[in-house]
Image (cartoon, rainbow, N blue to C red):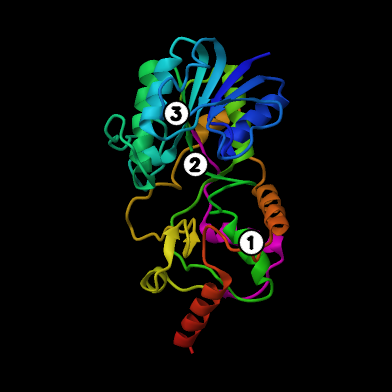
Amino acid sequence: MPSLLVLGGTAWLGRETAAQAVARGWEVTCLARGTSGIVAPGADLVMADRDGPDAYAEVADRDWDAVVEVSWQPRHVREAAQAIAGRALHWTYVSSVAAYAPTRTVIAEDAPLREPVEVDAVVDGSRYDAAKVRCELDTVAAHGDALLLRAGVIVGPGDPTERFAYWPRRAALAGQGPMLVPAPPAHPLQVIDVRDLVAWNLHAIEAGVTGAVNVVGEQREGFELIELIREVAGAHGPLVRPDADWLLARGVRTWKGPDSLPLWVPDDGAPARTGYHSGARFLATGGVRRPLIETVRDVLAEERALGVDRPGLAGLDRARELELIAAYEATTV
């Protein structure tokens, strides 16, 4: 029975990793504070504060068939990699395609990366990209043959960011009513279902895959994605499509968070962080992408169960959306 240590394991990606590994019959241990959720059934939890001394004492004195690290705080990643150096047959660091320098051309795994943050920097989301680069460097310093899983935009049930979930929720709530969708041009999207990412990672561990791999979905235009979501949700109301200048001037944010149109990145001619990454090595090493419609249906079912009219963590609330629609329509009369 393979032994797996998940550094993390009670939040979304880590918990999915633990759950799928348990389902494969692996012996799974998760090291976490235990404040982000409950451990997957069948996995063991070692409670530890990764900011504290001896955080890895309970897991550094044994051998592991595999370790999966999901943190993006450089100190956590460096100290864990050093503490368990020489004790793991396979090491995965879950990085991000955001580690690459922005571009408008297809990015393979040997493309230039961003400049890393300083060693042991304590970072917030504004330095996420450069923090991932530092974490990769520190991982490889301790585990030279590590798998660097550079993830694209991860979506699927349970996503705590609600970036993707906003659109099925909004389409279901809009129904036959109007729906605000940004006009082109926008950068394309590559979304990967969390379940597919984890399934490939566990397969890659078994197959001994190492080095950098872009784990990304098929490149899609944003409007293509929204049309599919509207079809699944049964939303047939009119689309209202202001351009980027109009939306930005009224305080609508891009990408994520409150008062945003999530996953929207207007194409102003500048390079982009996401949407242009090659998935060739992912597919060549056994990666499988489920049909996007399946992800949409599962996320929509979860959103309906939670309540499509509840306050969301990302996007516009319905009242704000309708205000913007009315203001835009007043300018087009």
Residue at point 63%, 63% (across, down) = 310
Q: Which residue is mark 3?
A: 50
Look at the image and say whether residue 234 sits in the magenta stretch: yes
Q: Is residue 302 left or right of residue 37?
A: right
Q: Which residue is mark 2?
A: 152
Q: Quadrant of the N terminus?
A: top right
Whichever of labels 3 and 2 marks the residue nearer the N terminus, that label is 3
Residue type marked 3: Arg
Q: Which residues are magenta?
A: 214-239
Q: Nearer the viewer, mark 2 or mark 1?
A: 1
Q: Position of residue 327 (x, y in %)?
A: 47, 82
Judge the density around disc 3: few (<14), some (14-19), many (≥20) Cα neighbours within 10 Å: many
Q: Which residue is mark 1?
A: 169
Whichever of labels 2 and 1 marks the residue nearer the N terminus, that label is 2
Q: Is residue 272 above or below residue 22?
A: below
Q: Position of residue 158 (x, y in %)?
A: 62, 46
- From the viewer's side, name the closer residue of 191 and 15: 15
Q: CA distance from mark 3 to mark 2?
A: 26 Å
